[in-house]
Amino acid sequence: MMLRTFVALLLGTNTLAADPIHTCENLCGSHFCEVGHTDIGAGVVTYRIGSFGHGGGAQTEFAEACASGHRLQALVFLANEDLLTSERSVDLDVKDQAKAVLSEVIRSQVAYSFEDLAARLTDVGARVAIDKRTEESCACNRAYPELRGSKTKFEWYQ
């Protein structure tokens, strides 16, 4: 499955024109925001979640196959703050290394599976996992509602 636009998203670019998936932009809760929703074609979407709180923050990149619900998660940044001492630490910051890997993937024009991309991102220090969702994401709901299958339909929360 081609992940070229997923790679472009991780590099901070948006290669596609506005479409219904962008209605998911800035889907935020009390300690997170989901942004960068992109339809990369063939039933695959991408997005990023930044989480934050009094004790630190994180950035995770996602690619999701809407029909199967398979999702790649790549944690590329993690920072913590000791609330008693206000000391800050960056425990993981591989955004630049991940961008370098992903730039190479774009230049190669090779089709990468989630497993292949996961291995490459893991090699540069990203904390990568692949799971399977049972609930539809906002991005899949907007871009590929016909691929929902037996997953629980996405609903906006209040």
Image: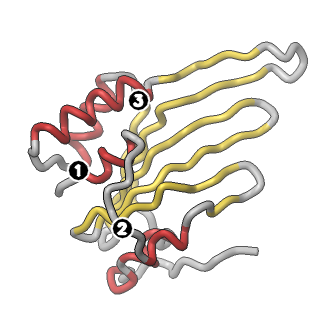
Disc 3 marks which amino acid? Ala
**Residue marked by disc 1:** 4
**Residue marked by disc 3:** 126
Dot 3: element: loop
Residue count near mark 1 (Cα–Cα under 10 Å), binned few <14, some 14–19, many ≥20:
many
In the image, is 111 to the left or to the right of 87?
A: left
Disc 1 marks which amino acid? Arg
Image location (x, y in percent) of residue 117 = 25, 40
In this view, 29 is above or below 128: below
Q: Residue at x 79, y 13 (%)?
A: 87
Q: Mark 3 or mark 2, which is nearer to you?
A: 2
Front position in the image: 132 or 112: 112
**Residue marked by disc 2:** 17
Mark 1 and mark 3: Cα distance apart in space: 18 Å
Q: Residue at x 41, y 75 (%)?
A: 19
Circle nearer the N terminus (2, 1): 1
Image location (x, y in percent) of residue 140 = 41, 72
Q: Residue at x 36, y 67 (%)?
A: 17
Q: Residue furthest front?
A: 17
Mark 3 and mark 2: Cα distance apart in space: 29 Å
Q: Mark 2 or mark 1, which is nearer to you?
A: 2
In the image, is 62 to the left or to the right of 16?
A: right
Q: Residue at x 45, y 45 (%)?
A: 61
Disc 2 marks which amino acid? Ala
Circle nearer the N terminus (3, 2): 2
Asked if labels 2 and 3 touch by Cβ distance under 8 angstroms, the answer is: no
